[in-house]
Amino acid sequence: MRVQPPAAEARLILRDVEHAYATRTAVQGISFSVRPGQTVALVGPSGCGKTTLLRLCAGLATLQGGTLTNRFAHTVMLFQQARLLPWKTVQDNIALGLKARGLPARQRRRVAQDMGLRLGLDALALAQYPHQLSGGMQSRAALARALVLQPDLLLLDEPFSALDVGLRTSMHALLIAQQQARALGVLLITHDLMEAMTLADTVLVLGGAPGQLVYRAELALSAARRSESWAYAQTAALLAQPVVRQAFELPPLDDARGDAAGASATQPQAGMTGQVLAAVHRKAQEHGC
């Protein structure tokens, strides 16, 4: 795979990044960039170093090789679990970061309420405690807590993986709407290739041990204009690539199906779409994803 140089406006730039745990190298030779308004998705099997890269970008791990430059003014990370404080109301949880920034109590409660309402949390939900909310509502609260800080770079560590398909679709729409409202850069980790094809402008596939970038897909259609059938077609086309199948330890497609899928990224065979998605789902389950 040819690594493209970062765009001039890129504010998060990784060049030949490497990180190891004790004697095990987690990632090696990783280069990519994120610019304002762009969503980059990192996908790959468990253990390929996706979370390591996200932690490096968040400053939660020490860079051991290469260079990492983050020129975004405000970076916020959203974790897989909502991590809401159980003794605080939902509104106070959303306002937590604003309190750390020194905003007066009345102002931060008003700002937190406004953001909560924009993300579908009504007055009752804002007054409740986290355990009184469904998983989907907790995810909305966690996203509101991140967005209320007005980040210009959002790091997402599979925050929607525990949600059912309906709630996940709703959260995707909320994120896309927020990104349309301002030039928010997003770096997303996900095991869900459909999620990557729904949200990302650039999809980077990691594979191997240590993890390395093995494939790059650039998606021209804006996220707001994508349909579910379009995302399915793109996912099937991605999974038809031999190097991607190898990264996920999937068996190779036979020549006829591989040629048909690779010929058009927007019109793959319908039967193949279901087969490859089912195969990658089984593989994810085997890895405990």
Image (cartoon, helix red, strand yellow):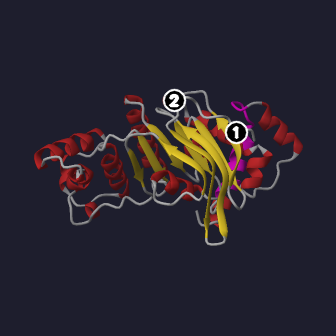
Question: From this viewpoint, is residue 73 visible?
Answer: yes
**Stretch in magenta:** 265-281
| Closer-to-camera residue (112/120) | 112
Count the labels in the image.
2
Q: Residue at x 64, y 53 (%)?
A: 44
Instruction: From the top left corner, tell me how far across and down residue 287 is, in percent.
Output: 64, 66
Image x and y of residue 61, in percent? 50, 60
Left/right placement of residue 42 relative to residue 1 reads left
Residue contact at pointers 1 and 2, CB within 8 angstroms: no
Q: Is residue 278 visible?
A: no
Image quarter where the C terminus lies is bottom right
Q: Residues within 10 Å of mark 1 (few under 14, many from 20)?
A: few
Q: What residue is shown at x 46% (from left), y 43% (from top)?
A: 169
| Quarter assignment of residue 50 | bottom right
115 sits to left or right of 212: left
Q: Is residue 16 magenta?
A: no
Nearer the observer, 224 or 180:
180
Nearer the observer, 178 or 237: 178
Residue at image location 51% in from the left, 34% down from the top: 35
Q: Which residue is mark 1?
A: 3
* Dominant secondary structure (helix, strand or loop) of the stretch shown in magenta: helix
Image location (x, y in percent) of residue 15: 62, 45
Type of amino acid under label 2: Glu
User: What amino acid type is highlighted by mark number 1?
Assistant: Val
Q: Residues within 10 Å of mark 2 (few under 14, many from 20)?
A: few
Q: Where is mark 2, residue-wise?
A: 9
